[in-house]
Image (cartoon, helix red, strand yellow):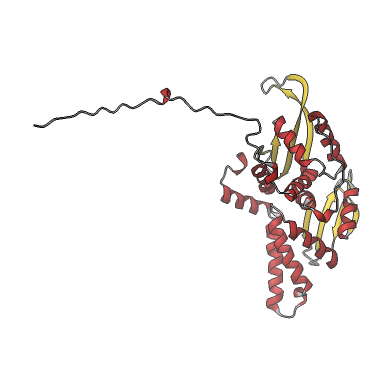
Amino acid sequence: MIILIKVVLIRTSETTRVPAKRKFSKLSNINNSKQIDTNFLFWIAGLIDGDGYFGMAPYICKKTKAILKPDWYPRFEITTHIVEANNLRKIKSRLGFGKVTKKTTTAVRYRLGNSVHTEYLAKLMNGKFRLSKRIAQFEKVCHKHEIKIKSKKFGNLASNAWLTGFFEADGHFGVNRKTLRLSIRISQVDKSILDEIKDEFGGNIYQSFSKNRNSSYWVYDCTSKKDIDKILNYFTKYGFYGPKRVQLVRFNRLFFMKSKKYHYSTNKTIRKKFLKNVHMFLKDKNYLFIIEKLKEKYGSDFFNN
């Protein structure tokens, strides 16, 4: 005798499932500050001093552009050249919040629109800025969030990574094509910060003017072998995160070759090797070349996240 058993499978609908309750916190996306390296925070402070901005803005309706609330909220952003977008993505990754967007064809921006995130960043950056204009902006944000400002005891410039961040924003490794002279330069309107750098690492400071001579600025220039060696040791210790990371390696190589007088060598192979490294160093500063490399690594939507 054969008995047939009919098995009926009943498939439950997705709509009948009761989703698990999730607790959301305003600080749920923020990394623990204890996990963030102190020197990385000083690096961020240096980058903000060079390319950052703290400000106050009103609540505005996106459609009508009308002011919704009379009360102003603090905002923060860093705007850099598009080839330095990796610096901003590094900050976003470490902190765990913020947006990196393409501002123009040649500029990219990291922005905080959340008041909680701005308050958290202000607490991390408290006591780490050096430029007077950035400190003035920062004090307004601290006043809004009722944060007590720490005393400005920055310590020695060589004791933390602040200068590496500041150099990523306003610094420049240079090689003269004709004389092959190596130089490390920082341009800034505020001369006082350049005086501090000079006192610590040596070098010279001179005044320069814009092309139309309507404005002037100060330039820190380091060209002597002794001073370059001192500042390169500092950069090697703390390191960079953007395009200057590659430039530092190749500039270090050029500095070594020139100190060994490769450019004066009677051996054509040695002299050709030095000139080849000069060419590779200058190639690194080709913006279009670096942008294409970034797109190859991260995809065409790299600047839209």
Residue 293: image location, x then y, percent: 60, 53
Is 206 on the left-hand or right-hand side of 244?
A: right
Most distant residue in the front direction? 1
Q: Quadrant of the N terminus?
A: top left
Instruction: Please identify the quarter of the rendering in which residue 258 is found.
Output: bottom right
Q: Quadrant of the C terminus?
A: top right
Q: Quadrant of residue 238?
A: bottom right
Front residue (pair 242, 182):
242
Residue situated furthest left in the rendering: 1
Image location of residue 265, percent across then percent down? 75, 78
User: What x and y, as percent, mark residue 57?
Assistant: 77, 27
Out of 102 and 138, give the one closest to the viewer. Answer: 138
Figure check: 213 above or below 251: above
Asked which quadrant contains residue 5, the reply is: top left
In the picture, measured across the screen, residue 214 lies left or right of residue 180, that is: right
Marks counted in the figure total 0
Q: Residue at x 81, y 59 (%)?
A: 184
In the figure, 69 relative to 3: above or below? above
Rendering coords of residue 264 (x, y %): 77, 76
Q: Nearer the viewer, residue 224 or 27?
A: 27
Name the residue at 85% across, 63% down.
227
> Residue, x 85% and y 48% (percent of image)?
154
